[in-house]
């Protein structure tokens, strides 16, 4: 059911070129290379940054990623041989929950950055904002530099994630300055429109993945058993930054209803200062006496191998997940996944065929589903096999990049000819 719509949105609409015709023209306008200036506010490696790496790689001969702060994301771009530049001055301090007053104060920090970006943009055909602060900067710079702006919207613009003023700013800037908004799921698109975003501006393009990167992974179980003292049993992996809305606590709560064989691997760290949450999680684990059953592995860069070593992946976000890269990665790694039934996750999983969807924030129901998976290894295998086939066909990086390149090209052409 939802997968039909995936295909619909990946198909050309209006005056797009058919996908097969887009091959070979990606990133080229009127025979000339199209130059893209990508903007991202974060130096950390979140899903938005990992997805941007995959897009920017496609444009590496004619693009530049400008980061508002340094960090592991810059290293990742360097390793992928994607040209990037890190801003030398201190980063912006606007948070997702910022109010009007803080917003006005941060204008002082913002204006020099807008000037820098506008100057850089002179030699590019397009500004591509990958995050919300990048949108704010990119929008102003696009007006100054008279360049088209594309906003890759990777967040659900709802009250759960953003303050009212931040939502209003995002919608107003997107509506007035962007020529195109790319949403990472239909849930993200819907939230944009519900918040007042113009429907004709926004297209859904799902994140793409390279299936080869998930094939033939080494089994890490023996190493993990040794290094992290994880006992043999039924291993559940949770792959996400440690953050309240990613819901690691829901999985820990569910453990109370599960048997002794269950071991939980929490992979990821607090990327954006959620140290209080980590402490509360640790206290909960101690309180329940689950120290031998929950293991913190920290941030890892061998995700496919870790996923392939688990019996089940749990995704437990308590607010709607905009897309959820970890869900598709689990499918491609051959590990069955149970995910919170909300947001983009409901578009990625066909319940009972390619994974399972569980009501969010409900540890008892989650435990029941996990228990059923645990008791049925053959069913797990069947679901994992179906999911792998489905995910590699539907979420191909090659196709995603072609669609994005086609969209960018179309928008640059439209702006230059008007
Ligand atoms: N990830 C990682 N190392 C970790 C934990 C997570 O590389 O230790 C990656 C994970 O594989 C996924 C991304 O971080 O690609 C998280 O993206 P997702 O869309 O699931 O959530 P986000 O954090 O962007 O909201
Ligand atoms: C954001 C979202 C996540 C999505 C990622 C890539 O980080 O939180 O759900 O998968 O962007 O689009």
Image: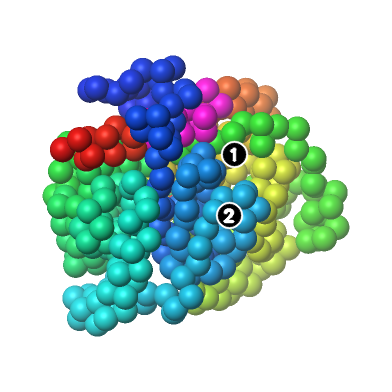
* Residue 400 highlighted magenta (yes or no): yes
Q: Is residue 30 left or right of residue 74?
A: left
Along the line of sight, which residue is nearer the eye, 332 or 236? Answer: 332
Res 374 seen here: no
Neighbours of disc 1 within 10 Å: few (<14), some (14-19), many (20+)? many
Colour convention of the picture: rainbow
Which of the two discs, 2 and 1, labels the residue nearer the N terminus? 2
Along the line of sight, which residue is nearer the eye, 192 or 314? Answer: 192
- Report the quarter where the N terminus lies: top left
Principal secondary structure, stretch drawn in magenta: helix
For residue 119, what is the image quadrant? bottom left
Mark identifier at residue 330: 1
Along the line of sight, which residue is nearer the eye, 374 or 66? Answer: 66
**Residue 213: x percent and y percent?**
66, 37
Would you name the residue on which mark 2 appears? 77
**Up-down: is 180 above or below 383?**
below
**Up-down: is 250 above or below 393?**
below
**Residue 86: x percent and y percent?**
50, 67
Q: Is ligand 1 less than 8 Å from the beta carbon at label 1?
A: no
* Residue 50 highlighted magenta (yes or no): no
User: Which region is colored magenta?
Assistant: 392-406
Which residue does the image show at 36% across and 77% down from the upper left? 93
Which residue does the image show at 19% across and 52% down from the upper left? 177
SS label for mark 1: helix
State how far apart marks 2 and 1 are (Cα): 23 Å
Mark identifier at residue 311: none
Q: Is residue 192 left or right of residue 19?
A: left
SS label for mark 2: helix
**Residue 104: x percent and y percent?**
21, 78
Which residue does the image show at 52% across and 23% down from the upper left? 393
């Amino acid at each position: 059911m939802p997968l039909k719509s995936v295909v619909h949105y990946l198909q050309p609409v209006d005056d797009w070129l058919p996908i097969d015709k887009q091959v070979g023209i990606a990133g080229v306008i009127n025979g000339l290379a199209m130059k893209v200036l990508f903007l991202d506010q974060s130096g950390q490696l979140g899903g938005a940054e990992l997805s941007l790496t995959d897009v920017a790689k496609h444009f590496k001969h004619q693009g530049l990623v400008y980061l508002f702060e340094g960090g592991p994301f810059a290293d990742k771009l360097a390793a992928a041989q994607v040209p990037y530049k890190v801003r030398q001055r201190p980063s912006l301090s606007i948070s997702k929950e910022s109010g009007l007053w803080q917003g006005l104060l941060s204008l002082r920090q913002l204006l020099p950055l807008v000037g820098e970006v506008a100057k850089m943009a002179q030699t590019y055909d397009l500004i591509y904002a990958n995050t919300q602060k990048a949108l704010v900067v990119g929008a102003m710079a696009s007006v100054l530099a008279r360049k088209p702006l594309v906003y890759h919207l990777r967040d659900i613009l709802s009250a759960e994630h953003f303050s009212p003023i931040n939502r209003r700013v995002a919608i107003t800037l997107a509506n007035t300055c962007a020529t195109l908004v790319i949403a990472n799921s239909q849930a993200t698109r819907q939230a944009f429109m519900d918040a007042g975003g113009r429907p004709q501006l926004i297209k859904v393009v799902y994140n793409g993945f390279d299936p080869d990167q998930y094939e033939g992974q080494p089994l890490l179980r023996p190493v993990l058993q040794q290094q992290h003292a994880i006992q043999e049993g039924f291993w559940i992996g949770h792959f996400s930054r440690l953050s309240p809305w990613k819901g690691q606590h829901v999985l820990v709560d569910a453990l109370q209803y599960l048997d002794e064989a269950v071991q939980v691997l929490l992979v990821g760290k607090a990327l954006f200062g959620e140290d209080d949450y980590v402490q509360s999680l640790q206290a909960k684990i101690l309180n329940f006496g689950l120290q031998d059953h929950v293991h913190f592995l920290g941030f890892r860069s061998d995700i496919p191998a870790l996923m392939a070593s688990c019996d089940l992946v749990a995704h437990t976000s308590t607010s709607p997940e905009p897309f959820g890269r970890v869900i598709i990665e689990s499918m491609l790694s051959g590990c069955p996944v149970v995910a919170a039934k909300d947001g983009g996750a409901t578009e990625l999983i066909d319940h009972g065929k390619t994974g399972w969807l569980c009501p969010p924030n409900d540890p008892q129901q989650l435990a029941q589903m996990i228990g059923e998976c645990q008791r049925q290894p053959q069913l797990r295998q069947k679901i994992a096999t179906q999911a792998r086939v489905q995910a590699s066909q539907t979420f191909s990086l090659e196709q995603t990049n072609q669609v994005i390149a086609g969209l960018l090209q179309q928008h640059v052409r439209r702006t230059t000819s008007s």
